[in-house]
Image: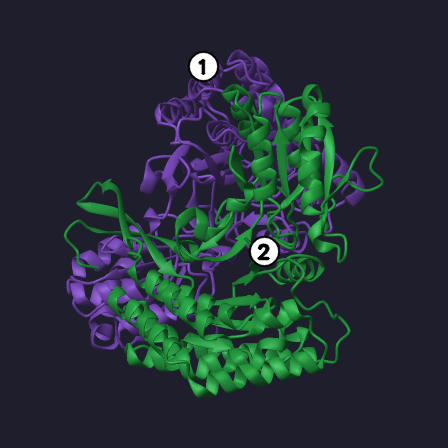
Chain colours: A purple, B green
Amino acid sequence: MCVNGTEERRAGEPSASGVRADKVVREAAELAAEAMGSVIAAPPAALDEALRAMAGLLRADLAPVRAANEADISAASAAGMSAALLDRLRLTPDRLLGMSEQLLSLATVPAEPGRTKIRDLPDGLVVEERRRPVGVIGANFEARPNVVVDIASQFIKSRNAGVLRTGSAALSSAASLADHVIEPALAQAGLDPRLIQVIREPGHELASALVRQATSLPLVIVRGSGASTRALAAEGAAHGVRVLAHADGGAVVYVDDSASPQLVNAIIEASLDRLGVCNRLNLLLIKGSAWQRTLSAIQPLLERLGVRASLPPHAHELGREWALEPGREATITVSQVTGPAHAALVANEATSQLAACVIAADEAAAAEFVGGYAGTGAFHNAPPRLLDGFKLFGIPETGINIDRVPGPRGPVTFRDLYLRQLVVKPKHSAA
Amino acid sequence: MCVNGTEERRAGEPSASGVRADKVVREAAELAAEAMGSVIAAPPAALDEALRAMAGLLRADLAPVRAANEADISAASAAGMSAALLDRLRLTPDRLLGMSEQLLSLATVPAEPGRTKIRDLPDGLVVEERRRPVGVIGANFEARPNVVVDIASQFIKSRNAGVLRTGSAALSSAASLADHVIEPALAQAGLDPRLIQVIREPGHELASALVRQATSLPLVIVRGSGASTRALAAEGAAHGVRVLAHADGGAVVYVDDSASPQLVNAIIEASLDRLGVCNRLNLLLIKGSAWQRTLSAIQPLLERLGVRASLPPHAHELGREWALEPGREATITVSQVTGPAHAALVANEATSQLAACVIAADEAAAAEFVGGYAGTGAFHNAPPRLLDGFKLFGIPETGINIDRVPGPRGPVTFRDLYLRQLVVKPKHSAA
């Protein structure tokens, strides 16, 4: 699950020149690459040891981290940041404890098997598939200091190095977490502390620079939705960089005529618990035969939630994403369909194919919807808000990707951050 | 394994305008997309039935196919095509039988499991990972009529539709195979015959058009190496299309000082059985302490093979790919390294990371090389010519990809041609 609308979109903000930004990113990538050797052959225990060391340092609530965070908050407050965003910026003791617990939890997740036998070949040879680290991975994410630690831990867990770039509002906190938590923890575990590099300069130009260095950063994860993510994904593609992102979201819920009204209300309410996120209910499709009674049944709920239903005829596109419209987030689009196949088609064609749900007691109708829907997550009688790495897999997500191509798709986790390598060797070779 | 240098590189050849080419490709993709419905829910038996029907039609050595192939050969011969390329163009009865047998073999390969349970969730729900077809996939490949059937069969096996584009020399054969083999076989198996579309117009402009339609063709496989592939991969990326390709190749062989001289000669000879292919020996790295005796030992072999060794100091880049240099294919570059780690570093940095081999009796040295080499295929005491889908997996390869990102990498097969989808549903739901 991502949070929309939190990324900087100040395309015209004063920034270092592109050349300088490229140099900053390139130098960070070089330092991170030099540190790769320390993880490529490290035992899994060393990686988990680094995560546990980070957890310990976070629990210590270090004075320099607290001071850096307070500086970020003062500056953001002076610049007029909203209370909600200020809250997300703040590293409270509770939040530090939560970050620490997440690291300890990730440290207990078994490493993925590095080698899988494919088959025997003639001449006493064997083919294995191996998982290799990608190398240095780029990450661009919202101005929340906890995400720095979150992403860093996932890169470490998957034996990758990283260049991390966050919004300027969280920059002091991010740098301080790198200096006082991530680096010492890596060193404590016997790993090269340069493995995780945090970009320490503000400016969206740095985000652009992050996605145009195909040689040193072939893979970049961009979190957050909307126009700036769309622009970064396009810029990355043009430079031969694979960007995992989801600029557009908005979940679809289809109400079949076999749906129980109680479940309809429960799923709609669960799908609107947060309005600024990508996998919230955005488009409600109702089967014609259930149209009137469903509208009547959900009306009191929508009123209670303060959510407006945009009914046909619509003066906007069916897939319009309300989470990205400041001030109009509390809206859902409601439209009529002829049945599950039609609903799946509309979900495929009118949306980014992030997530869709069918509410139906009739299992044939549910199967028809799920079979027809091509998106990254399909939900039967379960809210699309479950499209989230932690909820689905029990491990944190690195980002979300909605490309319609093979490879990581939907919630991306540390388990996805590897290169496939084939190895052929004599059966008894230790290579 | 791919064959280099066989793709058209006539950037300036007369062609339909880009606009017209885009229209031709888009219309083909639309027809193929309309046919997707017939495979998305078809039982695996129907897909294999289509392959068997194709096999049967090929064995019938149909008169229209033979006539179309003879027309292609006459035209190519009149245009001065070399005897070797003319041979590759010819659909002899033997070759038709071979194509037929390959189809029958693919039809016996079990379908990949479509659903894998990930874990139980609270509230009686379960998470599954599903494999969905990509949809319509593009393919651009060398002017060999058998490849039309090969690629079509892999798309059908993986429930995908396709838009196939081959070089103009094979165009009549390709169209005839589509009309008289692929389409009737699909119809016979109860599938929509429009599933596989073959572009029926000549011109490299069509290849460009194939990689710039991200909406209808999000994934394109480009076979062959060299400048035209590199250009298509870049053009595709700029248009947001994921192109699986390997513009550059050239295998590396590292000779450790623990290598048996017999094995060194055997692997070098096996790695030079064809000089125009991407995974042939291109760069031979020898450990300093074994330099003189290895050079002496391989000299008679190279003389017998008629292969020139380019020794240091080199007047060219270390990774220069001789397979792409007409008239100079019978060359290998030979260079000295300090040991397995250095050899892996050179292989990583001087080449496209397609394939590399370590020849060593010392297993620690072999492990050091394989552990350090980041390429798509690593080989211990086995020739890098084994980097080929059929040799490694026993199933035909669709293409080869050398991107350094998660997803299909190295030989790509039908098993890779799917989208990941997560499905959450009540434990006993049939959806």
Give the camera-side residue of A63 and B221: B221
- Please tell me which residue is depicted at 61% across the width and 24% down the height of the picture: B256
Q: Which residue is mark 1?
A: A56
Percent x, y of residue B305: 67, 46
Percent x, y of residue A70: 59, 24
> In which chain is the residue bearing label 1?
A
Specify the quadrant of the image occupied by residue B135: bottom left
Cα distance in 3D space between marks 2 and 1: 45 Å
Does dot 1 land on a helix, a strand or a loop?
helix
Determine whether B44 is above or below B336 in the image: below
Specify the quadrant of the image occupied by residue A375: bottom left
Q: Taking the image as drawn, is residue B306 in sight? A: yes
Seen in the image, is B293 located left or right of residue A91?
Answer: right
Percent x, y of residue A76: 62, 35
Give the camera-side residue of B251 and B344: B251
> In which chain is the residue bearing label 2?
B
Determine whether B122 is above or below A252 in the image: above
Residue B190 is tagged as none
Q: Taking the image as drawn, is residue A82 in sight? A: no
- Please tell me which residue is depicted at 53% across the width and 20% down the height of the picture: B362
- Please tell me which residue is depicted at 40% across the width and 41% down the height of the picture: A122
Percent x, y of residue B46: 27, 70
Determine whether B20 is above or below A359 in the image: below
Residue B245 is tagged as 2
Does dot 2 land on a helix, a strand or a loop?
loop
The amino acid beneath tag 2 is Ala
Number of numbered markers: 2
Seen in the image, is B9 located left or right of residue A155?
Answer: right
The amino acid beneath tag 1 is Gly
Give the camera-side residue of B177 and A218: B177
